Amino acid sequence: MTFTTNATITAFGGRFLKLTHQSASTSTPMNLTLFLPSAASAAAPAPLLVYLSGLTCSPDNVTEKGFLHAHAAPRGLALLFPDTSPRGTDLPGEHDAWDFGSAASFYVDAQKDPWNKHYRMETYLTEELPRLLFDSFKELDGARVSISGHSMGGHGALTLFLKNPGMYKSVSAWAPIANPSRCPWGEKAFGGYLGDDCEEWKQHDATELVKGWKGPLNCLIDVGTGDNFYKQGQLLPENFEKAVKEASIEGVSVRYQEGYDHSYFFISTFGEDHVKHAAKALGLV
């Protein structure tokens, strides 16, 4: 069997499945958590919202603190929470910093040695994991998928959406790292994973990618004005907004939420809005 089920947890009438599988992309075991609403079945498969977590996180953080399943369950929406990086490789320096290496993949396919042997998260998320998941779980509708994420995961959600037109029906993000090639977090990660070619960095930067987008963009972004990382210039949502405006792209909503920080209090407060955003795009509203 492709996936090993390590735990089954009942919540809001549905089931959390804590899963592990051996990944060909990363050459490591990979952890993920899947939430299946009670109505999901092979006869009536549920659409899926993918949530990409932020720096230092595992799939457990958002499932225990974000409460997205409370809003997804009554709508018949399944949720997928992949991990933030490969685990157990113990590469040199992998665990030395919280913003690079373990739990900090930035959802790219690394090009520099030794990271390129395992840190192939873009391929994992857009090719390998969907294929395995929809083959194994007939309760999921592989034709109806949206993507979302927080912080580093917001960066991942935006870039994977923009790089794969048609793969996802909508995208949303809480406090995304929206212009990583221009902020310290992104400069460190891209330099370490991708090398010194800044043109290559732009291929993994939502603000750069959106400049080439054609047509409307079904996108919701929330940023807290009390977020210290926003104040420090790590997120740069204004740069994304400016690029969207200059490209005359419609359908993008960027909301600045007064006083909210970067935490799961922020995510859980606006979680229902993001679930509704995806549910509407997936035909559930």
Image (cartoon, helix red, strand yellow):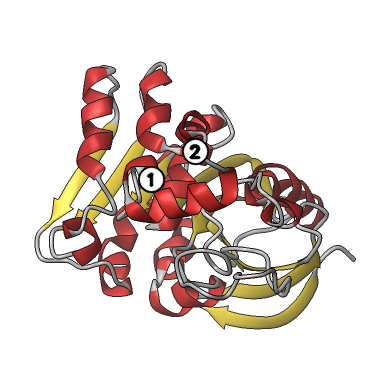
Query: Who comes first in sequence, dot 1 or dot 2?
Result: 1
Q: Where is residue 40 in the image (x, y as percent from the top left)?
A: 64, 59
Residue 204 is marked as: 2
In this rendering, is residue 30 above or below 185? below
**Marks 1 and 2, how far apart in space?**
8 Å
- In this view, the residue in front, 109 or 151, is 109
**SS for dot 1:** helix
Label 1 crowd bin: few (<14), some (14–19), many (20+), radius 10 Å: many
- Position of 236 with respect to 217 (left or right) is left
User: Is residue 83 shown to the viewer in this render?
Assistant: yes
Label 2: element kind? helix
Question: In the figure, 139 relative to 169: above or below?
Answer: below
Q: Which of 44 and 168 is in front in this view?
A: 168
Residue type at the position of mark 2: His
Residue located at (48% from left, 37% from top):
201
Q: Position of residue 169 (x, y in %)?
A: 49, 36
Q: Do the residues labelled 1 and 2 touch (CB within 8 Å)?
A: yes
In the image, what residue occupies the spot 32% across and 42% down? 182
- Which residue in the structure is indicated by mark 1? 180
* Residue 213 position in % (x across, y down): 41, 21
User: Which residue sits at x=23%, y=19%?
Assistant: 246
- Name which quarter of the figure residue 248 lies in: top left
